[in-house]
Image (cartoon, rainbow, N blue to C red):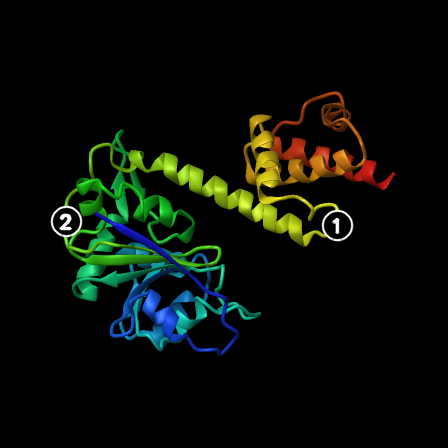
Amino acid sequence: MLIRSEAIFSPLAPNEPLSASHLAAMNLEDGSVVAVFDAAANHQVPELLQADSQTASCLWQGKAKEHLGDCAPWIGGLQPDSKALQYLFTEGPAPWHWWTFWPGILFRPRRSPEDLRRHLRRLSRVTDAQGQAYFLRFWEPQTAESLWASHAQDPSHVAWRFGEDIAAVIWPTSEGIAQVELPDPVTAGPLPERGIDAYRPLFRTARWQNFTNRVFTGLGKEGPLFDIFTQQEVQDMCNAARQAGYRREGAIWDVVRAGILLRSAGRDFSQETLVAWGDAMPPDDVSAARRLLARARLVAAE
């Protein structure tokens, strides 16, 4: 039911306008898109979106907007010449140069923007199989593939997500954008059986993949010794740290760096872990990883 496509782009320089190929890839030659951007991801989102869109407003209303408006999702229509749309593809020093740091995703509405707004507000609140209610952060680029492109041939899931109001969803990739389109509208339906539980494994996988990608990028910036590993090797090291019992991201980060330092010094990882921990195991994985990294740095400096 859904058609997925990708387009590859090089980042724009500051003040460089969107090209015809950008607009064509998003089917914006004669139309507009609706942005849902997260103020929690970039504090300038409300200001920039309101300056660029006459329809911009907080997606949440009432007390949620009153208390959380500064870190809530904002929605607004963007024309092809909108600055906010250009910023998504711009690489530069300013905090609004969002290439690789998109604060949200784009929707091509099938009906009016107000219809889309109502549809998205319904999507933002979900309930799992145990009856627990959650906010669904459907605007996050990190999990867009897992939500919007999944269950592509399941009518009930497609109807719940896209309904009559969404023609396409657009989000960033490492080299450009991805897009899923629903060629024909469907009657909106309720959250399918199993509800959000059907997406949770996909979300977990996507978040882990994004985390290991950040570790790979971060190691590349740390220079010699750390920048010699492939993306797969870094992912394997992160997997090994998680299998060893380290759960939090900060702990895994430290364990990976400690492992690289110890390996380069020809030291045994298990033995040096015992030395780092001393007489008692640290109370949590973050403390354990910090002690191990401190030991690894001492060994590397010998």
Q: Position of residue 123 (x, y in %)?
A: 25, 49
- Drawn side of residue 193 relative to residue 224, left or right: left
Mark positioned earlier in the residue sequence (2 or 1): 2
The kind of secondary structure element at disc 1 is loop
The residue lying at 55 percent from left, 42 percent from top is: 212
The residue lying at 22 percent from left, 54 percent from top is: 182
Query: Vertical placement of 228 versus 239: above or below?
Result: below
Q: Position of residue 189 (x, y in %)?
A: 14, 45
The kind of secondary structure element at disc 2 is loop
Residue 60 in view, yes or no: no
Residue 145 in view, yes or no: yes
Which residue does the numbered mark 2 point to in the structure image?
A: 188
Asked whether the beta carbons under mark 2 and mark 1 sit within 8 Å of each other, the answer is no
The residue lying at 35 percent from left, 36 percent from top is: 200
Alpha carbon separation for disc pair 2 and 1: 54 Å
Residues 42 and 300: in front is 300
Quadrant of the rendering where the C terminus is positioned: top right
Q: Position of residue 68 (x, y in %)?
A: 37, 56
Q: Amino acid at mark 2?
A: Ala
Question: Which circle, 2 or 1, is nearer the viewer?
Answer: 1
The label shown at residue 224 is 1
Query: Vertical placement of 168 versus 234: above or below?
Result: below
